[in-house]
């Protein structure tokens, strides 16, 4: 069994969805195909869940028109077209009814329709083409508790659903969406279809998880911000996980973990260049010697500094501080300590006020919002020399708030104010990879 995941841009037009249908039927291997919503749809549905009736109606009219055109370009068989028309009409009726309901709207319920629509239209396309396929509803097996997937439960449910459906060449399922412990519709957070694919791949011990997107693999810097980035040919699980967690948008922050635990390789491929081999993420340890391989940036970081003379020579001080974060269910990303102070960062500031109030028992607290973690990934083993120097030399004109080095052998992280992000990424591209910014 193989797992193929296609993102929103790979489904952006009917022509692209047809290319996807072609790609998955090039060979006879059995596959589970995980689809995101068509690009732009999730954002529109989030907007709809927050909209008043007038602006919500405008969003709905816009989407109805776009999907009417999409289905006409996609399907030719009359019965399939009629099914698509009926499905879209029922979908937009449900969304309209929800918009007009007075009670508070649930964003998660709304966004799920993005993946329902893409997978329903794609399933009809496969029927039209006579592919031996089945619709595999993600809500029947994808389960979370406390916001995280419960792999043993998912494995069990998925196997049962597959047995009930029976053998098919292609199973089509929704990325991103799931049910939580209260049986409500939930999701795996933005970009979550990658995570769905790796969870399924791990659950079924697939041969390979293929993530198809609109770029040729992971680049050594963020191509949305920096010119002259290059694809990386090989990445270890650890390197890919660090890059995804620290901001490389191409992969969901947590999606490497299930594949790594199950030792299933992840291959990244480009739908715009489908014959290229793509890049493979598979080895347990860093793939190469010799310093930096790639750079990523994670925005929306808050830095908290706790200054206290009680810390001097005290034991148990750090435990007390971290307990505050545990109580408020907030994870800490970076940490540095000195004799009398601790600085750490969080990316979820939902409970910041309560965290600061509780921390005040331990010292003087200062908070800096709008920070960015710049993460340099590579092989920084204990015996390597010069990597830190190259990074800091590249960033010599940029004020640095924190540095984290030595926590893992594949990551050096630097915290800067968000206003310096572009400058920092460009400086590292020049300093580490010899790529200046002239095209
Ligand atoms: P999909 O819709 O297929 O899930 P995404 O938009 O989520 O695609 O991810 C692909 C995009 O990630 C690319 O188009 C690129 O602009 C962006 N990106 C950010 N950082 C990187 C990186 N280091 N390497 C490759 N792409 C990156
Ligand atoms: N459709 C969801 C999103 O836009 C999930 C995904 O694309 O992976 O975030
Ligand atoms: Mg994505």
Image: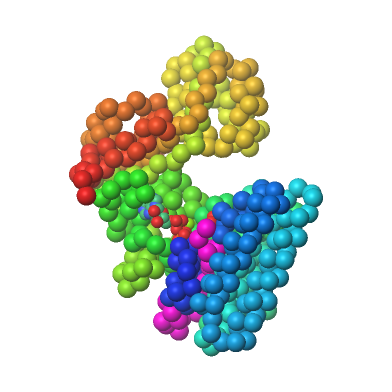
Q: Which residues are magenta?
A: 22-40
Residue 417 as seen in the image, left or right of residue 179: left
Q: Residue furthest top?
A: 309
- The image quadrant where one finds ligand 2 is bottom right
- Identity of the residue drawn at 46% across and 46% down: 245
The front one of 236 and 171 is 171
The coloring applied to the image is rainbow
Q: Position of residue 122 (x, y in %)?
A: 55, 75
Asked if one can make out residue 261 in the rendered structure from this viewpoint, the answer is no
Q: Position of residue 383 (x, y in %)?
A: 26, 39
Residue 280 as seen in the image, left or right of residue 67: left
Q: Is residue 98 magenta?
A: no
- Identity of the residue drawn at 54% across and 81% down: 75
* Quarter residue 100 falls in: bottom right
Asked if one can make out residue 428 in the rendered structure from this viewpoint, the answer is yes
Q: Position of residue 339 (x, y in %)?
A: 44, 16
Q: Is residue 24 magenta?
A: yes
* Quarter residue 424 falls in: top left
Q: Position of residue 254 (x, y in %)?
A: 51, 51
**Vertical position of residue 338 compared to residue 197: above or below:** above
- Identity of the residue drawn at 73% across and 64% down: 94
Q: Residue furthest right?
A: 102
The front one of 281 and 435 is 435
């Amino acid at each position: 069994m193989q797992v193929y995941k296609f993102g929103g841009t790979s489904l952006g037009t009917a022509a692209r969805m047809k290319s996807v249908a072609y790609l998955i039927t090039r060979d006879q291997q059995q596959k589970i195909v995980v689809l995101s919503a068509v690009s732009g749809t999730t954002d529109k549905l989030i907007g709809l869940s927050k909209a008043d009736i007038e602006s919500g109606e405008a969003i709905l009219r816009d989407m109805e028109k776009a999907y009417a055109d999409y289905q006409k370009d996609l399907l030719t068989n009359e019965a399939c077209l009629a099914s698509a028309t009926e499905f879209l009409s029922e979908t937009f009726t449900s969304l309209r009814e929800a918009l007009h309901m007075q009670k508070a709207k649930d964003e998660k319920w709304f966004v799920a329709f993005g993946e329902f629509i893409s997978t329903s239209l794609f399933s009809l396309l496969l029927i039209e083409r006579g592919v031996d396929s089945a619709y595999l509803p993600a809500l029947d097996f994808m389960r979370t508790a406390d916001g995280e997937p419960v792999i043993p439960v998912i494995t069990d449910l998925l196997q049962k659903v597959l047995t009930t459906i029976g053998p098919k060449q292609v199973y089509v399922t929704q990325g991103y969406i799931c049910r939580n412990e209260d049986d409500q519709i939930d999701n795996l957070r933005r970009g979550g279809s990658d995570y769905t694919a790796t969870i399924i791949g791990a659950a079924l011990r697939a041969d390979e998880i293929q993530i198809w997107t609109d770029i040729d693999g992971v680049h050594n810097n963020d191509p949305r911000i920096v010119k002259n980035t290059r694809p990386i040919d090989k990445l270890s699980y650890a390197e890919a996980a660090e890059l995804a967690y620290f901001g490389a948008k191409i992969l969901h922050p947590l999606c490497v973990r299930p594949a790594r635990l199950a030792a299933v390789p992840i291959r990244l491929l480009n739908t715009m260049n489908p014959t290229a081999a793509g890049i493979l993420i598979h080895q347990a340890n860093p793939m190469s010697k010799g310093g930096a391989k790639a750079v990523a940036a994670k925005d929306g970081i808050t830095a908290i500094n706790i200054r206290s003379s009680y810390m001097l020579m005290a034991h148990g001080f750090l435990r007390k501080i971290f307990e505050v974060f545990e109580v408020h269910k907030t994870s800490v990303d970076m940490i540095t300590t000195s004799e009398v102070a601790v600085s750490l960062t969080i990316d979820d500031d939902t409970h910041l006020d309560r965290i600061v109030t509780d921390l005040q028992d331990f010292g003087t607290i200062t908070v800096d919002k709008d920070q960015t973690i710049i993460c340099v990934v590579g092989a920084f083993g204990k015996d390597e020399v010069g990597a830190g120097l190259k990074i800091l030399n590249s960033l010599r004109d940029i004020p640095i708030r924190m540095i984290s080095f030595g926590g893992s052998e594949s990551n050096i992280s630097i915290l800067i104010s968000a206003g310096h992000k572009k400058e920092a990424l460009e400086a590292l591209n020049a300093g580490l990879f010899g790529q200046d910014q002239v095209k």
